[in-house]
Amino acid sequence: MSDYDWPMQFRAVYDAASGRYHKGERNPQKLFSKTELEFLASIGCSAQELFDFIDDGVRYGEPGFESTLLTTTARREYFLIEQKGVPSSKQVSMDALPAKR
C-alpha cells in the first residue's frame, strides 16, 4: 500500500462499516471484517477508534468522513514515523479521562 492509495481503501472501509452501523451493528469488533481490521491495524487505527468516529457522526452530525480522514492521516503518520509501525503497549482507560459533558 502506498501513501497515495490508502485513503481510498480507508473510504471503502468507512463506507462499509457505516452501512453496517446503520443496519444496527454496534459492536466495534463485529463492525469490521478480518481484512478490514488488518488494514486498520496497518495504518495504526483501531476498530474502536473508527467506530467512535462513525458513531459520533451518526449521533451528533460530526465528524464527517473528511474530518475523520484528516485525523486518521495525522495519526497514521505518527504511527508509521514515530512508532515505526509498532502499536503502543499502553492504553488509557476511560476512567482516567475527564468526564464527558
Image (spheres, rainbow, N blue to C red):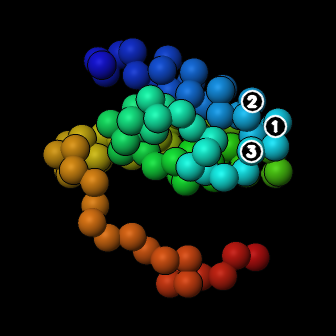
Query: What quarter of the picture does the C terminus occupy?
Result: bottom right
Question: Which is in the foreground here, disc 3 or disc 2?
Answer: 3
Report x, y in % for residue 10: 50, 27
How far apart marks 3 and 2 lie (CA) works out to 9 Å
Tell me, yes or no, whether the two marked residues, 2 and 1, touch with CB atoms within 8 Å.
Answer: yes
Report x, y in % for residue 45: 43, 45
Q: Look at mark 2 in the image and give the residue it sits on.
A: 19
Type of the residue with mark 3: Glu
Q: Is the residue marked by circle 1 packed among few (<14), some (14-19), or many (20+) residues within 10 Å?
A: few
Type of the residue with mark 2: Gly
Mark linked to residue 8: none
Mark linked to residue 22: 1
Q: Look at mark 3 in the image and give the residue it sits on.
A: 25
Q: Quadrant of residue 100?
A: bottom right
Report x, y in % for residue 25: 74, 44
How far apart marks 2 and 1 lie (CA) works out to 5 Å
Report x, y in % for residue 90: 32, 70
Q: Is the residue marked by circle 2 packed among few (<14), some (14-19), or many (20+) residues within 10 Å?
A: few
